[in-house]
Image: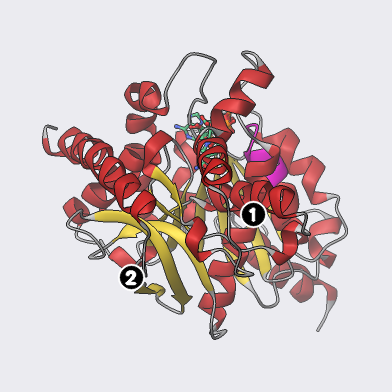
Amino acid sequence: MDPNQRLARFAAHLHPQKSVLGENSMLSLQDCRAKGGASGFKVAILGAAGGIGQPLAMLMKINPLVSVLHLYDVVNTPGVTADISHMDTSAVVRGFLGAQELENALTGMDLVIIPAGVPRKPGMTRDDLFNINAGIVKTLCEGIAKSCPNAVVNLISNPVNSTVPIAAEVFKKAGTYDPKKLLGVTMLDVVRANTFVAEVLGLDPQQVSVPVVGGHAGVTILPLLSQVKPSSSFTQEEIEYLTKRIQDGGTEVVQAKAGAGSATLSMAYAAVKFADACLRGLRGDAGVVECAFVSSQVTELPFFASKVRLGRGGAEEVYQLGPLNEYERAGLEKAKKELSESIQKGVSFISSK
Ligand SMILES: NC(=O)c1ccc[n+]([C@@H]2O[C@H](COP(=O)([O-])OP(=O)(O)OC[C@H]3O[C@@H](n4cnc5c(N)ncnc54)[C@H](O)[C@@H]3O)[C@@H](O)[C@H]2O)c1
Ligand SMILES: O=C(O)C[C@H](O)C(=O)O
């Protein structure tokens, strides 16, 4: 292939929206020789310049399953993109700034991860974020419905118990809703549960697996300590300590950060762990199972977090909770009551529009 053809081919790959040989093409020599993007998945992060977004972008750039990484935010994406794009891993990184670039950021994506929105300050509940974040999630999901309706969506923005129902309603209105492809990210609860349980048991957290079901706020976060792997028994005092610490994990970080936001680094780690599981599922790997807040028939509620099997179609199977002890059954009742209200609040936000 002659150098001009090679230039044109790489330019079309790297900047599909731009005229390849047009004036002031953004094509650079670096771009021309980029080898990334040959195979793998296309992933967009919405809110990529934020506290979660930046470390999440960095970790996704390292993920060998990612060939193209789109970083979208309403501020600062040029800097974050320039910075991350210097990492010598194969994913090609492109930045998109502001609402006018949302469509380009989303077109062709296989997976969209959304950490856009405001975080808590001390004294706030996650529900206190609803008024700002509901509108942000609505706008971004309208963009997804338009530009990549088949993408799997990992929704991180709080309050997850309401933002996932909001996203579902947006997709229903647009006629693009596939319940298997909308997943609220509750992985940080599992990551915390594994850590805190491992501390109590004196084990390596990597060897511990704790299912956490329900939702992602206070009492709706329900760790199933009777199902911990490796099989373990706990005193009642340990159960109460662990349940409370897992439920209050987010608040522990919010208080420690003292006004500077909520969990970002552990969240980026958890988000990447979950996104990687989604991508392995999309690739067709067998037996990929993680907890997520999804459309569900496990309880009478329309959404619930439990273990799901991730496959080519997203959350292909939603698992039942398994046997619960009396303490967990009581926790489940409390969780359902709060969850029901949060879900309804999300649904009403869209239906009232
Ligand atoms: N699901 C979870 O387990 C979990 C864990 C931690 C934080 N969170 C939530 O994640 C969200 C983000 O937290 P953070 O610490 O990264 O906040 P942050 O303020 O540091 O970053 C948020 C980013 O979103 C961007 N943003 C705002 N409006 C946008 C829009 N319309 N389109 C695109 N981007 C937009 C901001 O510019 C900012 O860069 C919060 O709602 C927080 O509560 C969820
Ligand atoms: O606690 C928060 O507000 C952020 C997040 O939901 C968390 O669990 O850390």
Question: Which element is circle 1 on?
Answer: helix
Residue at left offset 74%, top offset 53%: 59
Residue at image mark 2? 320
- Residue 54 among those drawn in magenta: yes
Residue at left offset 61%, top offset 40%: 48
What's under tag 1, amino acid-wise? Asn
Disc 2 C-beta below 8 A from ligand 1? no
State which quarter of the image contains the N terminus.
bottom right
- Residue 45 among those drawn in magenta: no
Residue 108 can be seen in this image? no
Residue 25's x, y, as percent?
Answer: 69, 50
Image side of residue 293 versus residue 252, left or right: left
Which residue is situated farthest in the left direction here? 352
Q: Distance between the residues labelled 2 and 1?
A: 20 Å
Residue 63's x, y, as percent?
Answer: 73, 64
Magenta extent: 50-56
What's under tag 2, amino acid-wise? Gln
Residue 4's x, y, as percent?
Answer: 79, 71
Above or below 50: residue 320: below
User: Any mark on residue 194, and which?
Assistant: 1
Task: Compare marks 2 and 1 and give the one earlier in the sequence.
Answer: 1
